[in-house]
Image (cartoon, rainbow, N blue to C red):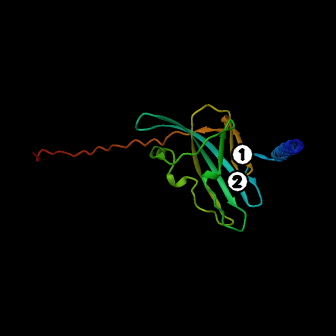
Amino acid sequence: MKKFKNALAILIMLSMMASFTGCISKEQTDSSDATQVTYQIGSPGKTEDFEFGVTGINSFDLTTEYGETFHCLLVSVTYTNLSEKEQDITKRNIEFYLDNEEIKSCEYRSEFEDFFDEGNLFNDNNVNPGRTKRGFIVYRIYKDYSKIDVVLNGITVSSTRDAVKPILPATPTPTETTQTTTEVTGNER
C-alpha cells in the first residue's frame, strides 16, 4: 500500500510539473507576440532574410456562367529575398485574415480575365538572392469584415475595410462604324 501511495504522489507531482511547464511556455509565447510589429499597406516589413509588403487591396464582384456571384479581394503583395540563398515562397505561405478568421486563397478562374491577367498572380517560382517577386493573390470572401491582416513569417500587414478600393471589370470600347458611300451616276444600272 505504501508503494502505491508513493507512486501516486510521484504521478501527481509529475503532472503538476508538466502543467507548470506549459504555463511558462505559454507566457513566453505571449510576450514574444507583444513585440511583433504591424505594418500598413505600402510600408513593407523587413527581417534579416526577406522584406514583405502589401501594396494594395482591391475588391470586385463577378458572376459565373451559372449565375453565382463571387465577392473577391485582390491583394497585391511584394516579396524581396535579402538572403544569399534561393527562397521558396508561394501564396500558400501567406496567411490572410478577415477579423481574425483565416481565409484561403483561390485559384485563377476564367471569370477573373476581366479584372487581371493570370500572369499577374503571385506565382510559385523560387526567389533568387536580391530579387523581388510581385503579384496578386485572390481571396473569395463570404462575410462582412472590418479588419484585414496579411501575415508572412511574423510580418503582419494590417488594414481596414476603408482602404479597400473597388475595381470594375474592363469595359470594351464601343466599335466605331464607318459608312461607305458610293456615288451612283446615271450610267450604272
Q: Nearer the viewer, residue 104 or 37?
A: 104
Q: Residue at the location (74% across, 61% down)? A: 49
| Residue 27, label in figure | none
Query: Which three-letter amino acid code belongs to the residue tagged 2?
Result: Phe
Q: Residue at the location (72% across, 42% down)? A: 158
Query: Which three-letter amino acid code belongs to the residue tagged 1?
Result: Val
Q: Secondary structure at mark 2?
A: strand
For disc 2, the marked residue is 52
Q: Residue at the location (67% across, 56% down)? A: 79
Residue 98 spot, x, y in % from top left: 66, 37
Residue 60 spot, x, y in % from top left: 54, 38
Mark 1 → mark 2, Cα distance in angstroms: 9 Å
If the image is split into quadrants, where does the N terminus sit? top right
Q: Nearer the viewer, residue 94 or 119?
A: 94
Q: Nearer the viewer, residue 58 or 2?
A: 2
The answer to which image quadrant residue 129 occupies is: bottom right
The answer to which image quadrant residue 96 occupies is: top right
For disc 1, the marked residue is 157
Would you call the spot at circle 1 few (<14 residues within 10 Å), some (14-19), or many (20 or more)? many
Residue lying farthest top? 144
In the displayed structure, does residue 91 sit left or right of residue 108?
right
Residue lying farthest bottom? 84
The answer to which image quadrant residue 101 occupies is: top right
If you read the primary sequence from the N terminus, does the residue marked by circle 1 or circle 2 appear first?
2
Q: Secondary structure at mark 1?
A: strand
Q: Residue at the location (58% across, 48% down)? A: 137
Residue 113 spot, x, y in % from top left: 47, 47
Work out whether 124 lies above or below 5: below
If the image is split into quadrants, where does the C terminus sit? top left
Query: Marks 2 and 1: in contact by CB < 8 Å?
Result: yes
Residue 70 spot, x, y in % from top left: 51, 36
Would you call the spot at circle 2 few (<14 residues within 10 Å), some (14-19), or many (20 or more)? many
